[in-house]
Amino acid sequence: MNHSASLPLDFLVNPFASFTSAFGPNGISNAVSGPSTGGGSTCISGDIGLSINTPGVKLLYEAPQDQMAVTESFVELFQVDSTFGADVVAGGASVISGDYSIFVKLCLPSDPEILAQVKTVQLLTHGATLDHTYWDIAPGYSYVDVASAAGYATLSYDQLGVGNSDHPDPIQVVQATAQVAVTHALVELLRNTELGGYRFDKVVGVGHSAGSTLTQAVTTQYPQDFDAVILSGTSTSAASVPLSMAAFNFINANTDPAPQFRNLPDGFLTQQSAAGIQFAFYRQPNLDEAAFRQQVAHKQTNTLGVLLTLGGIVAPSTEFTGPVDVVNGENDLVFCGGNCLYPTDQNSAVLSIFYPAASKGSQTYIAAGAGHAIAAHKSGPDSFKHMIQFLQDNSL
């Protein structure tokens, strides 16, 4: 890792000192430093301004104004002979263009000797209704800390329309192509500029659930972006997604008691209950109850803008030649119907269908007894260990 001379020396002496003024126009604004939630990393969090210009879809759909309209949208979307999706995307092409603030969290090893050896940064992309905290839930359940201990930097972020990032139009702007554009822009920053005073030699894409879909789309559209990718909570089948969406019982987030949603416009949706989150994301007896409660407390939003356009970005990554790691919970409901080994190994199918040119260093892993939210199950630490070993096996 190349260490920028602009980073104050006292950061190495006191890693939790404030150094907002250190960052230039390509750095992190409103920066705050402190420990990771897991306690094992030093992190810089704040905002990055990104400009995106990408194709979108003119969706023939208005944000639902009340709960009956929200529910009816999903009833019609998942009807057996539904034309709802096709009708909504029939408005033709659009252009999504604008400047947006994206919340990021750059985490680094706290040990100066390990920090000096960092060359690779992992870009962590969360799943739908999650945010950056998925990667750093609690002590013992922090992928960020495991990566730091192994000598990696991580950059987690809130997707457009999520958490501390900007919330533009949830139908016409917060679409799948916009999310891909944001992810690609972050990769370009990590490769071509200093971020938080650091420059990295290699970039690895790590995704979970819909974040894996976005990461995989980047490898299709920009095959040179990542040196390797780790995809978790994903498969080649979306057959069980409607069941998961039904369990969520989506509501307009501004009707939820959570204060962070109060000022959001209609069209930003969130899960109504903890029971729905458990149904889709977790599996007893292997979930960690404290980690589960943490996720419920930090539940986030999704939009029909993303849900209706996500399928349009899925295509085989025929030109990506780096190593790929596919990690799934054994009992993932969302993408495996509750059994990722039935009727065949779903992880292997991801490699063969989506990554025909991936290197021989590619691997797969099944997290024993875990549901969809791999990081919040008791087998989470074992999954993290595998992910780091995959990178080390490929000299990253």
Image (tube, rainbow, N blue to C red):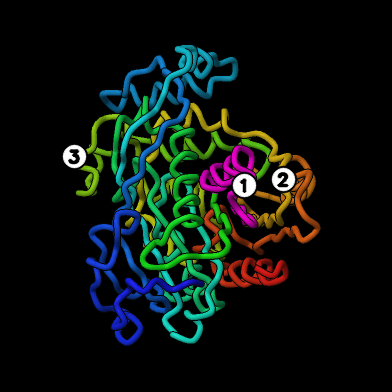
385 and 204: which is toward the camera: 204
Measured Cα–Cα span from mark 2 to mark 1: 8 Å
Magenta residues, as a range? 209-233
In the rendered view, tell whether residue 79 sits above or below residue 3.
above
Per the image, label 2 sits on a secondary structure element best described as helix
Q: Which residue is mark 2?
A: 350
Residue in the picture at 53% in, 15% down: 86
In the rendered view, tell whether residue 293 sits above or below residue 277.
below
Q: Is residue 347 left or right of residue 262?
A: right
Measured Cα–Cα span from mark 1 to mark 3: 32 Å
Tell me if residue 290 can be seen.
Answer: no
Residue in the picture at 38% in, 17% down: 61
Q: Which mark is residue 263?
A: 3
Residue in the picture at 62% in, 72% down: 385
Q: Which residue is mark 1?
A: 234
48 and 147: which is toward the camera: 48
